[in-house]
Image: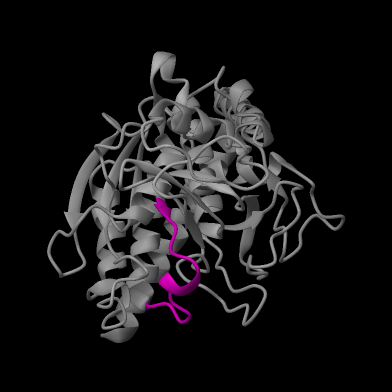
């Protein structure tokens, strides 16, 4: 769902894009920034007073990232190509997602170009799939045997704090696999926050999409400028939250910009919010990061949850506030006196002893 605007953009982004002169690079970059309506919708300028993603590594499992794009210079670590086809040209889709997560803009004070949700974060690019138009794509899932599962494990073993998987719609799977689910649990056990796009066939088959549907993954749907769920956004009970996903301006692998619709963009933004939380609270568990994102939403459904909106529309500022509240509450629990902790410790000791006794009994029964 992308619309390349002749390699560049001009003003009038909200009302439809038209081509401009190829030499007007500065105007193009300025227009790209002007079209980023999500910056205000997510309350990012206010959130950045707390954190910008400093010290956080976000693994982008996608088609590869064009690290020389003006908005991504100095922000990308190139990881392996796991597709089995050899390193190809830098991926357009992966570049777009990376820019939404950690785009730094360029020009005077970084005022032009695409600015990501966590502009001080670092992207670890791991190529696990081919572009949607690549004729080799249909031969094997994600272009290689267990590429996604191996990519998740690689990211977890190489310093990723957050793993972003914008693999919804036709680039995902409708069935899932044991190796991928095991990799997801492995990464969570290593402390990684995993985010994935919910899928882009909500107005047709509305299929269950993986990796979004794996337990523990933050599945993200898409909303438009009015914060209404986009027709294409999948409506499933695994959806966690929704984020901006229509008319999204992103970097393109041709040193240009593109406008796109999809849950892919929405997922990348939520990965960016997770990076902001991890930057402010490095030791926060994946579970509590997810809780902060879900509690810090707007437009929450009347019943608290719906398969269309999940827990509501994400908001970076509110998510950081919830993270601070959760962190403060956790610190207060840690600071309880030894006397108040002793019953808990005693109970844990008894539980361990009981479990050990059951194991010994089972062994004896087997013999």
Residue 165 covered by magenta stretch: yes
> Outermost residue toward the top?
109
The kind of secondary structure the magenta stretch mainly shows is loop
Residue 233 image point, x, y percent: 63, 65
Residue 169 covered by magenta stretch: yes
Residue 304 image point, x, y percent: 80, 54
Residue at x 69%, y 39% (from the top left corner): 296
Residue 304 can be seen, yes or no: yes
Q: Nearer the viewer, residue 197 or 178?
A: 197
**Where is residue 341, by image quadrant?**
top right
Residue 83 image point, x, y percent: 21, 67
Residue 164 image point, x, y percent: 42, 51
Q: Nearer the viewer, residue 26 or 353?
A: 26
**Where is residue 121, by image quadrant?**
top left
Residue at x 63%, y 62% (from the top left corner): 239
Q: In the displayed structure, would residue 61 be above or below residue 213? A: above
- The reply, left or right, for residue 41 in relation to residue 68 is right
Residue 172 can be seen, yes or no: no
**Where is residue 108, by image quadrant?**
top left
Q: Nearer the viewer, residue 30 or 336?
A: 30
Segment colored magenta: 164-177
> Outermost residue toward the front?
21
Q: In the displayed structure, would residue 241 be above or below residue 201? A: above
Q: Nearer the viewer, residue 26 or 279?
A: 26
Residue at x 25%, y 63% (from the top left corner): 150
Q: In the displayed structure, would residue 286 be above or below residue 21? A: below
> Outermost residue toward the right?
302
Residue at x 55%, y 46% (from the top left corner): 18
């Amino acid at each position: 769902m992308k619309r390349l605007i002749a390699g560049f953009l001009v003003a009038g982004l909200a009302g439809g894009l038209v081509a401009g002169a190829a030499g007007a690079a500065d105007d193009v970059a300025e227009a790209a920034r002007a079209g980023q309506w999500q910056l205000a919708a997510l309350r990012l300028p206010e959130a950045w007073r707390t954190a910008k993603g400093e010290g956080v590594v976000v693994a982008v499992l996608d088609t590869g990232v064009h690290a020389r794009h003006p908005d991504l210079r100095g922000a990308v670590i190139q990881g392996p190509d796991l597709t089995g086809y050899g390193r190809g040209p830098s991926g357009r889709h992966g570049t777009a997602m990376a820019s939404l997560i950690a785009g730094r803009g360029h020009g005077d004070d970084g005022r032009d170009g695409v600015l990501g949700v966590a502009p001080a974060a670092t992207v670890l690019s791991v190529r696990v799939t081919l572009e949607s138009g690549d004729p080799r794509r249909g031969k094997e899932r994600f272009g290689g045997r267990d590429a996604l599962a191996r990519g998740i494990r690689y990211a977890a073993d190489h310093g990723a704090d957050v793993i972003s998987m914008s693999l919804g719609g036709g680039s995902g799977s409708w069935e899932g696999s044991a190796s991928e689910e095991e990799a997801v649990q492995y990464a969570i056990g290593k402390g990684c926050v995993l985010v994935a796009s919910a899928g882009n066939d909500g107005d047709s088959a509305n299929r269950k999409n993986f990796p979004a549907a794996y337990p523990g993954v933050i599945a993200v749907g898409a909303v438009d400028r009015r914060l209404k769920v986009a027709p294409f956004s999948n409506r499933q009970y695994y959806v966690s939250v929704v984020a901006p996903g229509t008319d999204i301006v992103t970097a393109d692998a041709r040193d240009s910009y593109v406008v796109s619709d999809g849950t892919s963009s929405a997922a990348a933004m939520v990965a960016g919010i997770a990076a902001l939380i991890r930057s402010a609270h490095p030791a926060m568990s994946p579970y509590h990061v997810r809780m902060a994102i879900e509690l810090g939403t707007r437009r929450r459904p009347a019943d608290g949850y719906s398969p269309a909106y999940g827990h509501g529309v994400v908001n970076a500022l509110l998510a950081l506030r919830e993270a601070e509240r959760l962190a403060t509450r956790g610190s207060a629990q840690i600071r309880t006196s030894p006397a108040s902790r002793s019953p808990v410790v005693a109970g844990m000791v008894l539980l361990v002893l009981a479990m050990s006794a059951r194991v010994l009994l089972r062994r004896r029964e087997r013999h």
